Image (cartoon, rainbow, N blue to C red):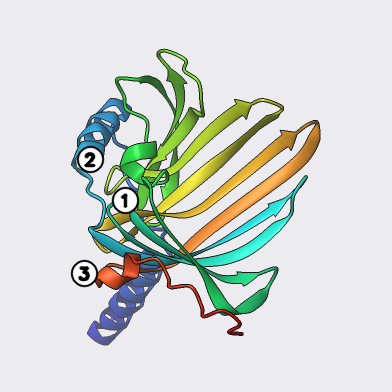
């Protein structure tokens, strides 16, 4: 083979190898030991901090004994809450309904996430999440108590906070099961959706909540949490 021929053959071989390399799928992410994941989860959930101030919207839809379709905007600072109802049954309100209250955030990740001291965690499987793995666990309470019970959890393989928390609940003639899902928004870990399938007095019922439009202002004016003044008598 001439020198020119050898050069041409080398170029063809290099091109072929490059094509094979380009076609080869990327290596799968490595799986972490499930107990190490739980250790990192325990540290992450103790270190997580809620935002000082947060503004967001949420939509709630209920089907069952009572049907609800609403959209709200929430302003929260600590336990202070301003709840503005923006739309009902798909119709935007010309005048927002404003309610001022003080209450804990029951969907805050540090409040809802199960603690490893209170639940036994059984590793089930890893699941792909982009370029990393998340880890799915079954949760069993060490001591059963009244109220919702956590059934399972999916731990994010990067921040080691819950991506999803599965639960079941029963009270009176109502029982159901559901899931709350979370995602990162800047430095914070916030809810993005909650779904519940239930039976109320023997009839099926469903509820879905979706959160979005998160903002984390440095401060909120004091008037945010002042009760709205009543309209003058006879005002439209």
- The CA span between labels 1 and 3 is 14 Å
| Left or right: where 205 falls relative to 111 | right
Q: Nearer the viewer, residue 138 or 231?
A: 231
Residue 28 appears anywhere in the view: no
Q: Nearer the viewer, residue 106 or 154?
A: 106
Residue at screen point 62% across, 27% down: 171
The residue pinned by badge 1 equals: 79
Q: In which quadrant is the C terminus drawn?
A: bottom right
| Left or right: where 236 falls relative to 121 | right
| Left or right: where 143 falls relative to 88 | left
Which marked residue is nearer to the observer: mark 3 or mark 2? 3
> Badge 1 local density, few (<14 within 10 Å), some, or many (20+)?
few
- Tell me, yes or no, whether the two marked residues, 3 and 2, touch with CB atoms within 8 Å: no
- Tell me, yes or no, whether the two marked residues, 1 and 3, touch with CB atoms within 8 Å: no
Question: x, y percentage for residue 173?
Answer: 72, 27
Residue 61 appears anywhere in the view: yes
> Badge 3 local density, few (<14 within 10 Å), some, or many (20+)?
few
Residue at the far top in the pictured view = 143
In the displayed structure, 117 sits above or below 163; it is above
Q: Nearer the viewer, residue 102 or 214?
A: 102
Residue 235, by quadrant, is: bottom right
User: In the rendered structure, which disc, 3 or 2, sits on the residue that comes first in sequence?
Assistant: 2
The residue pinned by badge 3 equals: 219
Instruction: Find numbered disc 2 in the image and state the secondary structure of the residue it sits on.
Output: helix
The residue pinned by badge 2 equals: 44
User: In the rendered structure, which disc, 1 or 2, sits on the residue that comes first in sequence?
Assistant: 2
In the displayed structure, 109 sits above or below 219; it is above
């Amino acid at each position: 083979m001439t020198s020119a021929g050898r050069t041409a053959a080398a170029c063809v071989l290099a091109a072929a190898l490059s094509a094979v390399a380009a076609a080869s799928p990327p290596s799968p992410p490595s799986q972490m030991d499930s107990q190490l994941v739980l250790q990192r989860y325990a540290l992450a959930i103790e270190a997580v901090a809620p935002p000082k101030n947060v503004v967001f919207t949420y939509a709630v839809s209920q089907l069952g004994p009572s049907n609800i379709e609403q959209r709200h905007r929430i302003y929260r600072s600590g336990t202070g809450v301003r709840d503005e109802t923006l739309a009902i049954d798909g119709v935007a309100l010309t005048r927002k309904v404003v309610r001022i209250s003080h209450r804990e955030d029951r969907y805050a990740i540090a409040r809802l996430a199960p603690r490893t001291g209170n639940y036994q965690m059984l590793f089930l499987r890893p699941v792909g999440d982009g370029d990393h793995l998340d880890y799915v666990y079954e949760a069993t309470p060490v001591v059963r108590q009244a109220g919702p019970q956590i059934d399972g959890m999916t731990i994010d393989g990067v921040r080691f906070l819950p991506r999803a928390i599965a639960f079941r609940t029963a009270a009176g003639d109502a029982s159901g099961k559901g899931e709350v899902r979370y995602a990162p928004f800047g430095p914070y870990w916030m809810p993005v959706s909650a779904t519940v399938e239930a039976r109320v007095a023997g009839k099926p019922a469903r509820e879905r909540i979706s959160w979005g439009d998160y903002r984390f202002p440095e401060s909120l004016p004091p008037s945010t949490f002042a009760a709205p003044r009543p309209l003058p008598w006879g005002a439209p």
